[in-house]
Amino acid sequence: MDDSMQKLIEQYSRDLMRFHGAHGGAPAAPREPGRPDPPDKPEPAVRPDFPPEIPGAPAPAPEIPVRPPAVPEMPDVPAPAPEMPSPPVPTPEIRASEPDRRQNDLGFLQVRTYTAREATPVPDALVLVLQEGQLVRQTLTDEDGLTELIGLDTVGRDLSMTEGTAEPFTTYTVQISAEGYLPVVSRNVPVFGGVTAIQNVGLIPLPEFDADGPDEVVENTEPDL
């Protein structure tokens, strides 16, 4: 090859390099005529590490795996027993009890003895108060023919205020005897709670011819309240 041809090839190569440099690329070097094509260069293997190592740069810190915080184990808590419903409390049956007809209240009785159609009182008359044959009280009349107030057990006074109550009182038997007079028995004498009842008893003098006559019996005598 002569020198002029060699200069033309070199000039062409320089012009081609400038052209590709101005357009962002570098051309492949011109192949001399008669030379075989160079073998293809193998592409460099892609390294797994990225970014590429920079000479002189400090090695990156090893990655420390982040572990989740440990959750403390909770002890097994026994499940609460199911609440059993409370059985219903039976309502007690309320029954109206019969009142104590002897000791539920206190009533008072006063006996007045007289003779000659209430003109003359009879003193020192013996008065016995009985209930069901049992002696409850005994006393004497004074100079006015009156006994003291005799307190006796009876039913409650509220029963006497209740309409329809069969017996709002308690009955007693009163026996009166005085020297020179016929004995008197007054049965079923009612005594009311909280009330003072006065039992008037008229005594009959003994006949001179029959000193041992029978007792005078008065049934269901109503006292003066």
Image (cartoon, rainbow, N blue to C red):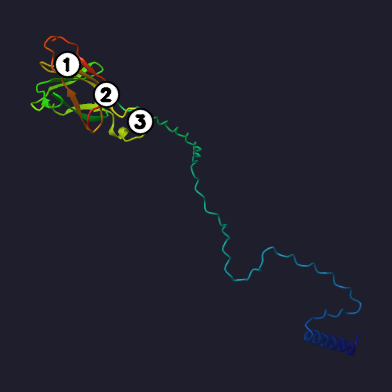
The disc at residue 172 is none
Residue 34 point in image, percent of width and height: 91, 77
- Residue 183 image label: 1
Element type at marker 1? Answer: loop
Task: Decide which of 99, 24 is in the foreground and name it.
Answer: 99
Q: Which mark is residue 165?
A: 3
Residue at image position (12%, 27%) is 119
Q: Residue at x 12, y 20 (%)?
A: 125
What x and y, as percent, mark residue 220? 27, 22
Q: Quadrant of residue 50?
A: bottom right
Q: Are marks 1 and 2 in contact (CB under 8 Å)?
A: no
**Gap between marks 2 and 3 measured at Cα:** 15 Å
- Image coordinates for residue 221, horizontal then vertical, percent: 25, 24
| Amino acid, disc 3 | Thr
The image's mark for residue 171 is 2
Alpha-carbon span between mark 1 and mark 3? 34 Å
Depth check, front residue: 133 or 9: 133
Q: Are marks 2 and 3 in contact (CB under 8 Å)?
A: no
